[in-house]
Image (cartoon, helix red, strand yellow):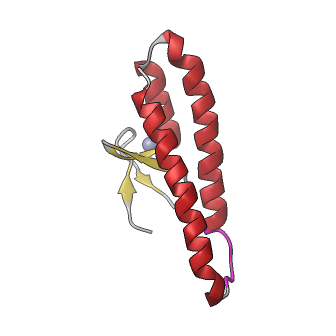
Amino acid sequence: MAEFKCYVCEKKVKTGEKFTFTKKGSVHSDCFISQRRKEISEENQEKLRVLSIVLDIELQHLLGILDIRDQPENIKETVRLKYKDIEKACGETTRMISELN
Ligand SMILES: [Zn+2]
């Protein structure tokens, strides 16, 4: 995996850690959520709480797919496409969280 640095805590993102990408770059999902919690208005805190649970589930799902061992060659492409789908969902949820104000 390529090396990424979290723009909030400035630590390297390690394999198996949950992270996402925003316009500002790569960020641990926990760092991202706690930063957003401080930035957004009181009325959107509940939305943030729910979306952060959704994102966490999606990221867990991604890591789970990365963990599948011993994939026969003839299924790798299918798994890659499934991974892409979930990655896209993570991107959408991250964008929704970024847009809360
Ligand atoms: Zn971080």
**Where does ligand 1 appear, by image quarter?**
top left
**Which residue is at the far top?**
42
Tell me, yes or no, whether the highlighted magenta stretch contains residue 78.
Answer: no
Is residue 16 in view from this perspective?
no
Place of residue 41 in the rendered image (x, y in percent of width and height, measured from the top left): 45, 13
Q: Is residue 4 above or below residue 75?
A: above
Q: Which residues are magenta?
A: 66-71
Residue in the image at 37% along x and 38% along y: 8
Q: Main secondary structure of the magenta part?
A: loop
The quarter in which the N terminus is drawn is bottom left
Place of residue 83 in the rendered image (x, y in percent of width and height, measured from the top left): 57, 64
Place of residue 80 in the rendered image (x, y in percent of width and height, measured from the top left): 56, 72
Residue in the image at 54% along x and 49% along y: 89
Place of residue 74 in the rendered image (x, y in percent of width and height, measured from the top left): 64, 88
Q: Is residue 33 above or below residue 3?
A: above
The quarter in which the C terminus is drawn is top left
Is residue 7 in view from this perspective?
yes
Residue in the image at 61% along x and 59% along y: 63
Specify whether 3 is left or right of 58: left
Residue 3 lies in quadrant: bottom left
Residue in the image at 58% along x and 41% along y: 55
